[in-house]
Image: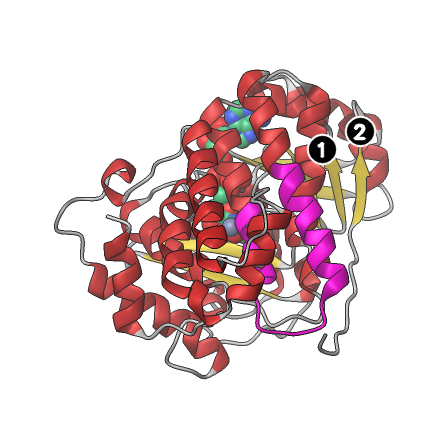
Amino acid sequence: MNNFNYYNSTRYIFGHGEYHNIGSLLRPIAGKVLLHYGGGSSKRSGLHAAVVASLQAAGIDYCELGGVKPNPSVELVRLGIELARKEQVEAVLAVGGGSVIDSAKAIALGTTHPGDIWKLYTREEKQSAAPLPVATILTLPAAGSENSPNTVLTHEQSARKLGYGHESLRPALSIVSPELFLTLPPEQMAYGACDMLCHIFERYFTNTQGTELTDALGEAAMRTIMQQASILRREPHNEHAWGQLALAGTIAHNNLLGLGREQSWACHGLEHELSAVYDVPHGAGLAVIVPAYFEAVWRANPGIFAQWATNVMGVTPSRDTEHVIREGIARLRAWYRELGLPQSMHELGLPDDADYAAMARAAVATYGARLGTDTLPGVLPLDVTAAEAVYRAAR
Ligand code: NZQ
Ligand code: ZN
């Protein structure tokens, strides 16, 4: 295990009805907030009204900005920054899924950043100020943004989707009330479960040695995600299963499971190009990328893939490591199918003439540049040709 330095600054509140306490929880943090939400689900469910009532009861002033769409755009963020400055808010309250939370983090960041918000994402500028505090009420367990230090934005004109991470972006406060997930359509549950599972894959499949504890914790979280998502496929109103899935989803991405390990993020690098160019849901894109990626890289470290196949996918151990790994990947594909996730680029809706070479170049440039390499990191680093081959194998 490598050295690490971990600080998780989010107050995490879990349980039925806890969102009614948002006003009193925010009181010590801010007297005025920007209430940020998506395309309308929180209004239809009555959550928006409950949040407003709680803010008013606690004497917290607010202004609001809705309309965040999946794969959130920098354009709306710019409007949010203008509003937050004009109204002199002291915090941003996100009520929604990963897209709303990421947009809220970007507004919080941009309100105090003297330059151009998008240039933080492109690394042309550096963060020089602390962002406003962000609080979240999660309505979709998936991206893990409720406890991660990351935000992902799309710049539609240039078809680029980029992430930005800084410890100051972990939310000050996140509320997870599982009954809020009962209105989610089945495909969003599936996208979310697929995303959280992949957040663990990106950390679990490593060449770092001596990671027994985080291996075991990650395996427990992976099994939980798969089991609870299968239950929710049959019983979408099982609030207990939603709670288990949501907690696993938070742990999957707050980096507890990545401590002291070299991490990959190759599947995310490849997927973000699909979302940027074709606006596909992040979890759906991952379901198509992951099996093709595993098949391309497992030979570089058969030990960790065989361990996963036996401990997570329930394959009987055998001396025939290749068989064990292939069976593990086949079971993963079967689980994706059970959840109704796409199995190929074609099912994902990509055209036959998709420019995989351009997406491979962009993915390698973005993810390689951060580590100063010209490859996508992972158990087997992938150059542009190998990255393009993963896309093509997934067609
Ligand atoms: O906009 P509304 O009307 O609220 O509808 C949303 C949206 O259409 C709907 N929804 C959310 N909660 C609901 C609901 N519908 C009914 N009932 C509810 N309770 O679900 C749709 C999708 O929402 P979205 O927020 O886009 O999904 P998700 O949470 O999967 O977030 C995806 C975004 O997160 C990024 C992804 O790239 C993508 O842009 N990620 C962020 C990460 C981070 N910040 O750490 C890490 C991830 O790897 C990921 O990249
Ligand atoms: Zn993800």
Residue 321 visible here: yes
Query: Where is mark 2, residue-wise?
Result: 15
User: In the structure shown, which secondary structural element does the residue marked by tag 1 occupy?
Assistant: helix
Residue 136 sits in quarter: top right
Q: Is residue 34 visible?
A: no
Circle 2 — which element? loop
Amino acid found under the numbered disc labelled 2 = Gly
> Which residue is at 84% across, 39% downward?
25
From this view, report whether residue 55 is shown above or below residue 267.
above
Does the magenta run of residues contain 206? Answer: yes
Q: Quadrant of the N terminus?
A: bottom right
Q: CA distance from mark 2 to mark 1?
A: 11 Å
| Image spot of residue 187 (x, y percent) | 45, 28
Q: Which mark is residue 244?
A: 1
Amino acid type, mark 1: Gln
Q: Nearer the viewer, residue 384 or 327?
A: 327
Give the extent of the magenta segment. Answer: 197-225
Indicate which disc, 2 or 1, sits on the residue closer to the N terminus.
Answer: 2
Q: Select label 2 or label 1 by which is in front.
A: 1
- Residue closest to the far bottom: 372
